[in-house]
Image (spheres, rainbow, N blue to C red):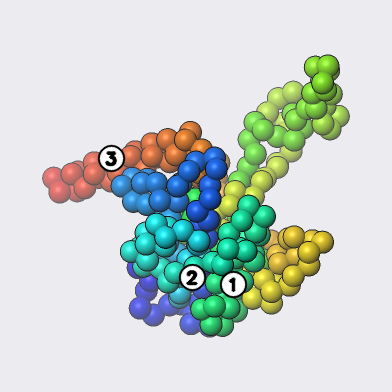
Amino acid sequence: MNQTTPPNESSLATAVVIGRAGSKGLPRKHVRLVGGVPMIARSVGHALASRRVGRVLCSTDGEAIASAAAAGGAEVLLRPAVLASDHATVDAGVRHAIETSGDDSEVVVILYGSIPIRPDDLIDRAVERLVDTGADSVQSYSPVGKHHPFWTCRVGDDGRVAAWQENDVFRRQDLPPAFIPDGGVIAVRRDSLFQVDPEHPHAFLGRDRRGVLNEAGAVIDVDDEIDLLVAEAILERRMRTEASSTRVGAGS
């Protein structure tokens, strides 16, 4: 839960957890149980646990998602149909939630409801970097690992293979560092969030975009059954480790 007295009242952000009902890769994924908890509620819980978040909203078009998010402690804002299609943008849904709720926070944290696992301190790190640097937005990134762009190829209709980018790197340890947005968190200033440019869908991130880094596997974004199994396995291992530590502590 949030601390009663946050480190800096002026730096408190509003978190918007987003979860659309029409998932095709994994139907009803936002209300699937992960470690016995609806997936959307895990992101709500992450926001509530953050020292830098003072209010938690949930933007959704699904009744089951709304119920799970509300039970987890979020204020629910139901989206209109125009913001519930496959073509609706993330930032449009977040802007609707901020405007409809009457929120006036200067910092907004965007959390995907399909991410049941993220580092405990991730939200705070992102907000702190945003505030400390004066950037327009901060996203979290993870290393690409063996799926490095140097080893990405094009395969033609005739099966002919060509390197995506010519290079002579054959050992993984010689690859230059490369990172990809992992979806764990986006912290954005209100002014940037409300910059709308149809020709530049990421305009809401502003010009000064910063990042915070996670270790590989620290964020699990659930898109399919395999991702769900991975998330379940990680949470099960955590629960076993915590139970073991409790037994050891009780016996000392």
Q: Position of residue 230 (x, y in %)?
A: 44, 36
Question: In the image, which is nearer the foreground, mark 3 or mark 2?
Answer: 2
* Mark 3 neighbour density, 10 Å: few (under 14) some (14–19) many (20 or more): few
Q: Label 3, label 1: how many angstroms apart (C-alpha)?
A: 41 Å
Q: Position of residue 31 (x, y in %)?
A: 40, 51
Q: Secondary structure at mark 1?
A: helix
Q: Label 2, label 1: how many angstroms apart (C-alpha)?
A: 8 Å
- The residue positioned farthest toward the left in the image shown: 251
Q: Label 3, label 2: how many angstroms apart (C-alpha)?
A: 36 Å
Question: Relative to residue 149, is residue 64 drawn left or right?
Answer: left
Disc 2, disc 1: CB below 8 Å?
yes
Q: Is 191 in front, or is 128?
A: 191
Q: Indicate whether 162 appears above or below 61.
A: above
* Mark 1 neighbour density, 10 Å: few (under 14) some (14–19) many (20 or more): some
Question: Relative to residue 188, is residue 221 drawn left or right?
Answer: left
- Residue type, label 3: Arg
- Residue type, label 1: His
Which residue lies under the disc numbered 1? 96
Q: Earlier in the sequence, mark 2 or mark 1?
A: 2
> At 74% from the left edge and 70% from the top edge, which residue is drawn?
196
- Residue type, label 2: Leu
Q: Position of residue 81 (x, y in %)?
A: 58, 63
Which residue lies under the disc numbered 2? 77
Which residue lies under the disc numbered 3? 240
Q: Secondary structure at mark 3?
A: helix
Question: In the image, which is nearer the foreground, mark 3 or mark 1?
Answer: 1
